[in-house]
Each structure stands twice: as structure tokens, then as C-alpha cells.
Amino acid sequence: MDTIIKNASIVKPELLTVDIGIEYGRIAAIGNNLPHNAELEIEAAGRIAFPGFIDSHVHFQDKKVFKDTDFRTESEQAILGGITTVVEMPTDSQVAKPTKIRDKIDAIEGNGTYVDFGLHAGNMNLRALDWMPDAVRIGLTSFKGFTCEPYMMRGPAIDMFMAKAKELDALVMFHCESQNLLSGSSVAKAEDYPASRPRAAEVMAVTQVLGSASRSQAEVHIVHVSTAAAADNVAEHRNWLQNLSAEVCLHHLILDESHIKEQGARLKLNPPLRKKEDVDALWYHLKNRNLDFVASDHFYVPHTRKKGKFSDIPPGVPGVDASALLVYTHGVEKREMTLARYQEVMSESQSKRFGMWPGKGSLEVGSDADIVLFDPKPESRFHTRRDWSPYEAMDVKGEITDVFLRGEHAVAEGEITGNPTGKYLFRSTPYNNTPG
Ligand SMILES: [Zn+2]
């Protein structure tokens, strides 16, 4: 063995104390009394070993938007937060043409990444449908469209998009806000922003996308569900639509409109923050499997760019460094989410839905040795290593002490140990994890 993690607790779904043996970057053995002849032995008594966390919705790299940061800087924040795999979403530029996808992979690997990564294609339009077969051939199997500007697709285009995805067994993802109900661009004050992108806009767009999903039978995923009504709608449709999944983002689980009063314009987000009742409903649906998992929708720009004229402020907040701790604190500690469900929403379900199972998101022999050692005891306040975070100084329970990426001890005692060794992940088509 290269490494043995001794006396770790794993979630099966009860906590079970085991040793985990790692060889050639994979989990080679799990059990008690493994032969202790490894180069590296780590005593993990009292700590939980989770499969490396996955964040399937992050914005890391786009020269048009991110001038001071790139995949390397953002992936460093990710691995310190226990995330070992991300799937990156295009931001302002379209990434759908296979040459552009290859260029992006080369640029990221050339500059280094601390986590393994897949890419989503976006922002789709009719022309980009022709490129989908080639994208699937290079391991990119998920494609994002919008029901609103700046990349709005209309009904017939959405149907054609889904028909193409069905043909390829690929996954369609949608940002759901109905354009004709949005008036966000005229808003001057942070407090007025949520009302300019009303909840009805999300509900209408979700209904439209679910209609196309039911006609096409394509695999469809709704990104960042933010309202109680839209989550209820998704939950209802799951009774007959087997091809559906939906995500909730960290900020919609932790923040609500009242935080805008404290933090102001930097909490500009699409869809915007909602009411406390929405937050409660999102947690309910996440625990009850109507929402499949949590992503951060990480979008970091320095604080200087999150103030000034409101209409010029780019929408989005960072979160990839905070999500594992905050979902544990608010989900497991405060809302009685089970550890098994936590492990699913932070890792396993994302791996399955985005075609990475069982290499990622699994603590089984043969899976990649992506492992997070988590100490559930410490109580502290979240502290970002950046100049700002919407979660700064919030109470957190637990601590991520060690992170392994394909067997490499990437984070030890909370600090990065070496150089970036992340790789591009060739993803297969989505596993349908709709609960029965
Ligand atoms: Zn996003």
C-alpha cells in the first residue's frame, strides 16, 4: 500500500470504523486490521472519511469576466474546502464548439488545477446543436441553455435542443427565469433587485422546461432552483417524469433577502435571494430527494468589483470554499439531515448525474482515492482566505483537516501540500438517479 488511513469512520449508512488502503491512486482495500506496511499512515480516529466532495456548478475561467483569477486560483479554494472534483460552467462566453472546448481543457491543464474537472457546454443556441455529438465524443455530456437573456432559447429551440440530447443520451441543463417577467436591468438599488426578477418568472420557466422534458423524454436538469413554488413544481413532476433532476445552490440555502440589508449590492445574484419561507422549503425538498444535490455556483470577483453602480455589478457570489462546512452545519447539525443524505448531496448524486460514477463520489475498492477527512467536533466561524465571502464569520461546525486527490495527500492539516495535479475528466452519459 502507498497510504493507509487508520480508524476512520465511514457512512454505511451507520458510522463504521475502518482502515482505508490506497494504492496507485485508487482505493485498494477497506477493512479492519489492514497490514500496516504503507509509506504513509494517518491516524484518523474520531474523524469521518467522506468521498471527495463534488461541485458540479462553478464558474472558474472566462477571460471576459475573471481578470484576476483563473481555474488554478479557484481550484485551490475548492480543494481547501474539501471539493476534489468540479464540473465547470461557461460564464459570459459560449463554450460549445469542440475546438473551443479542447482549447479550454488545454489552457486549464497547462496552467494547473488542484482538482479534477469536467466541463459543461453552454451557452447553447440553435447553431451549437450541431456541435453536440463531437462534444460528447470528448467526454462533455451536459449542455446548458437559458430561458432568459442573454442566451435565451425560445420554445421550438428548446424542443430541438432536447430532441438532440435525447438522441445522444446527453444531459440538458436549464437556467429557468422567464424573460418576459424580468425587469432587472433597470434596478438601481440592491433591495429592489429580488422583486425585479420575481418568483413567478422562475415558476413559469420551470413549467415550460418540464413540458419540453416530458415531450422529449431527454434527461433534463434544472440548475439553481430558488423558490418554494418551483421546488414544489419539480417535486410534483417527479411523480411521472423519470428523466428529471434539480439542484439547489448554497446561497439559496444559507442566505435570504434579509442578508441584502446587511451586505448590500454584493449579494446581486440570478436568480436573486428569496424569502425565509423559500429557504425552509428548499431544505425540505433537498432532504426529501426532490432536489438532488447542492452546488455552489461559485463566482468570485474581488470586492472592488462588487460595488459602485448597481447595474454594472456582475451577478454571483463565491462559495466553493464554504459549501461542505455550511451544508454540514445547516443541514446535518441544524436540520437533522442524515450523514448518508449529506454524502449523497455533496458527492455521490452529482457523480452519478454527471457521468462520473463510480470513479468519483464513492468510497469503494476500485474508486479513485478522493477522500476528505472531516473532524465533526470543532466549532468555529467561517473564515475565507479571500478579500470577501458572503459567509464570512458565520458559525460552522466541523473542520476539513485532510484531502486526498487520487491518493495524493493534497491538503494536510488544512494546508495545501504540493503542486496542482488535477486532470480533465472524460465523462459518460448521465446516470438517472431519480428516486423510485
Ligand atoms: Zn451559474
Image: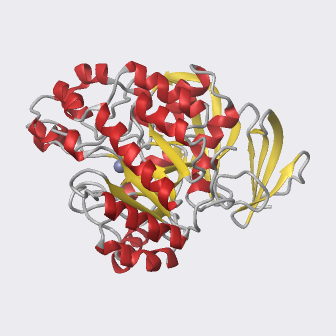
Which of the pair 278/31 is nearer the observer? 278
Q: Quadrant of residue 164?
A: bottom left
Which of the pair 266/209 is nearer the observer? 209
Q: How many labels does the image show?
A: 0
* Residue under the point 22% across and 28% down: 195
Which of the pair 271/235 is nearer the observer? 235
Is 278 left, or right, of 29 in this rendering? left
Residue 76 showing in the rendered view: no
Is 198 left, or right, of 226 in this rendering? left
Quadrant of the snapshot with the N terminus: bottom right
Q: Is residue 415 above or below residue 428?
A: above
Q: In this view, does 308 lie above or below 363?
A: above
Q: What percent of the width, then of the height, locates residue 314?
A: 20, 45
Q: Is residue 214 above or below residue 283?
A: below
Residue 209 showing in the rendered view: yes
Q: In which quarter of the image is residue 338?
A: top right
